[in-house]
Amino acid sequence: MDSKTDYLFKNNFNLKLYMKLNGKKAYFSHSIKTYNTIDEEEEFEFLQNFFNGNIICPNNHSHLFVNESDYTDIFRLVDVLIVSEYNGYVGKGSFKDCETAYRKGIPIYLIERNGSSFNFRLVVDFVEVSNFNPIEYGNLVSISLD
């Protein structure tokens, strides 16, 4: 096996999902609280390997997000939305990304850390829980892919 395959297998990725999403372009939506942290770095590294580099991250690709409308326009370029939670919640920006992806028929997956590995869950719904807290704005309802 090559090092990429070794890396993905070490992270217990879902082979069926990998085959389904291979060659797709993804948008990685996550809390600004995780920007420039080891958590963001490790999640992004895993996603880069999983999507063969076809992943857009607002923190790493800030040049794509000049205007507020760019955050919704980005969905014309991607096939899938990957969302990460912070303390069990998604922030207002990620929540809005889920709404946009849902309206456009783009599948939404939650990336979860399980120790030193990652797995995905299919997001089937999202619920606003606090209109006043932009960091703990909503919850995702997701199902296992196993």
Image (cartoon, grey):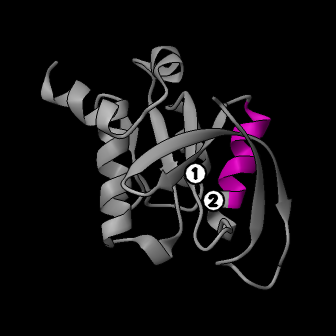
Circles 1 and 2, Cβ within 8 Å, touching? The answer is yes
Q: Which mark is residue 83?
A: 1
Q: Quick one: quadrant of the N terminus?
A: top left
Q: Is the stretch drawn in magenta largely helix, strand or loop?
A: helix
In the depicted structure, whether residue 113 falls above or below residue 32? above
What is the quadrant of residue 23 in the picture?
Answer: top left
Out of 18 and 61, give the one closest to the viewer.
18
Left or right of 77 in this view: 103: right
Residue type at the position of mark 1: Val
Crowd tier of the residue under label 1, counting other residues whose Cα lies within 10 Å: few below 14, some 14–19, many 20 or above: many
The residues colored magenta run 95-104
Which of these two is toward me, 10 or 51?
A: 10
What amino acid is labelled 2 in the image?
Ser
Up the image or down, 93 lies above or below 109; here it is below
Residue 118 placement, left or right of 98: left
> Quarter of the image containing the C terminus?
top right
Residue 104 or residue 54, whichever sits in front: 54
| Residue 63 shows in this picture | no
Task: Determine the CA span between mark 1 and mark 2.
Answer: 7 Å
Question: Residue 6: x and y, percent?
Answer: 22, 29
Q: Secondary structure at mark 1?
A: strand
Q: Of discs 1 and 2, which sits in the foreground? A: 1
Q: Residue at horizontal 70%, vertical 76%?
A: 136
